[in-house]
Amino acid sequence: LTLTTAGESHGPGLTTLVEGLPAGLELDREEMNRDMARRQLGHGRGGRMKIETDTAEVTAGVRHGRTLGGPIALQVANRDYANWEERMNPWPVEAEIPPVHMPRPGHADLVGVWKYGHEDVRNILERASARETAARVAGGALAKAFLRAVGVEIRSHVTQIGPVVIPEREQPLGVGDFEGVDADPVRCLDAEASKAMVAHITAERKNNESIGGTYEVLVFGLHPGIGSHVSWTERLDGRLAQAICSIQAHKGVEFGDGFALAATPGSQAQDEIFGPDEDGEGIHRHTNHAGGLEGGMTTGQTLVVRAVVKPIPTITKPLRSVDLSTGEPAKALRERTDNCVVPAAGVVGEAMIAFVLASAYREKFGGDHIDDVRAAIAAYEERIGWV
Ligand code: EPS
């Protein structure tokens, strides 16, 4: 499976190309656009979200709601382009367009102009912008539709914003616990923590600060043996980490108990294996410290991925920088901006994880039609006695 995006933040629009899905897969237009809207959620988004109402328009690869087996093309319009037509026109314009020459610390701006030989920082920031994640979510919605067809469901929730952390849970989360998470202003499952997160975002916006945080993505219904131990390139934890860390402003990822395992004795860090119970349950575990991954493969337990998002670098309190046209000290570009994107980032994390998992399913089970995929999965379930 491949997922390619194209597009600039204030250009005419974003394009997504997804290749490698089987034919006959049913797609739900509303479901796809629900994900597009979910990515726009969250207390802490800026003025741009009032301009955009994102939808993914299919322009290739789908007929009457089913995949044809060829590349699928999706288009997401940038409504804001109407206000940027001269500045972002693909073709020369009459007007004089003042270049941006104040790079923002923490953004791709400075290194990007060095590397690509541009004088206008806008030639870098437009593509580096997290607007691009709208195209990833559009593609991720296709991967999710594939996963749903084989019984796999993906959810996410916010676990920390600034210093506010959700309380530890007694019981592991189930897929049913996520109902209503998108109705919460920060996509948090704990009502008390949510209130404190909202208050923190509001207070820090008044201080002209941006805020980071963490979110968790859980995947239910996975088969064991997705990914492989045989080569580093196939280890699923490595592939998932790459996909997560490729998201703008993401600085780290952990699986299961993650960084806390550093202080856990070895005997308590593994998930012991138990034989079939009298009630007929197959080989199983009572814990999930590993977060559903052993030896670079899914174990068949819930996949638990946590990601950290840094405070975004465009802030309304401009930081010190240098004017690239004069070499003189200057304040970084001050722009309309979001001050917290963690609730939306969780939706992007879902999309990226869906893409990696759908890819690994395609590699393991093959199939040109979705029914071929289901048949291959059923044969595998039978061979390993998976219930
Ligand atoms: C972004 C800056 C803001 C965000 C944008 C990402 O846009 P603008 O500069 O137009 O105000 O709103 O995110 C989106 C447009 C989006 O759809 O997520 C940035 O610099 O990364």
Image (cartoon, rainbow, N blue to C red):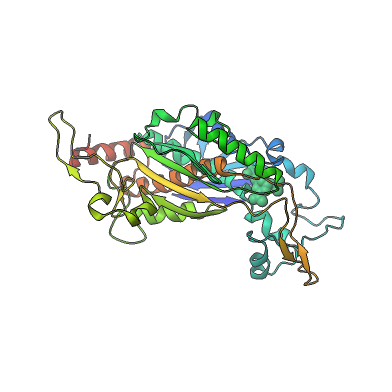
- Please say whether residue 375 is visible from this viewpoint: yes
In which quadrant of the rendered image does the C terminus lie? top left
202 lies left or right of 138:
right
Residue 107: image location, x then y, percent:
64, 59
102 lies left or right of 203:
right
140 lies left or right of 257:
right
Q: In this rendered view, identify the residue nearer to me: 145 or 298.
A: 298
Q: In this rendered view, identify the residue nearer to me: 354 or 283.
A: 283
Residue 341: image quadrant is top right
Residue 349: image location, x then y, percent:
49, 45
106 lies left or right of 325:
left
Above or below: residue 230 compared with residue 169: below
Residue drawn at x 56%, y 41% as measured from the top left? 344
Residue 240: image location, x then y, percent:
42, 52
Above or below: residue 111 compared with residue 6: below
Residue 231: image quadrant is bottom left
Above or below: residue 251 compared with residue 207: below
